[in-house]
Image (cartoon, rainbow, N blue to C red):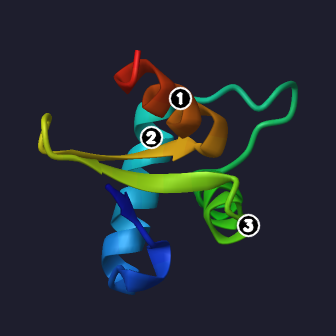
Amino acid sequence: MIIPHQQLDPNTLTNLLEHYVLREGTDYGEQEFSTEQKMEHVKALLISGEALIVFSELHESVNIVTKAQFNAMQSEDYQ
């Protein structure tokens, strides 16, 4: 189930973004970025629709995934 980021309480969204960027440990190349900068980047992806907040009923968890990852997950479910 996709959860629109606009429907989350701002504090909840901030906590979700922080948890995501700290968990992912994403490499942004040669330049170092602060946690806040990474969070703003992911938030921009959510706003643009490039990333989605997804709730898994099966795993009872929430995750942020790219639109491509979500589409791939949907394809796997139907195969």
Residue 3, relative to residue 41: is it above or below?
Answer: below
Task: Give residue 25's mark.
Answer: 1
Q: Earlier in the sequence, mark 3 or mark 1?
A: 1
- The percent coordinates of residue 23 (x first, y second) are 40, 34
Question: Which residue is identified by label 3?
Answer: 48
Residue 11, relative to residue 1: is it above or below?
Answer: below
Looking at the image, how many numbered discs can be counted on the residues? 3
Disc 3 marks a residue whose amino acid type is Ser
Q: Earlier in the sequence, mark 3 or mark 2?
A: 2
Tell me the SS state at disc 1: loop
Tell me the SS state at disc 3: helix
Foreground label between 3 and 2:
3
Q: Residue at x 39, y 24 (%)?
A: 78
Question: Which of the pair 41/64 is nearer the observer?
Answer: 64
- The percent coordinates of residue 13 (x first, y second) are 40, 71
Whole-angstrom CA distance, mark 3 to mark 2, is 22 Å
Whole-angstrom CA distance, mark 3 to mark 1, is 22 Å
Check disc 1: other Cα within 10 Å, few if <14, some if 14-19, many if 20+: few
Tell me the SS state at disc 2: helix
Task: Give residue 22's mark.
Answer: 2
Q: Residue at x 52, y 38 (%)?
A: 70
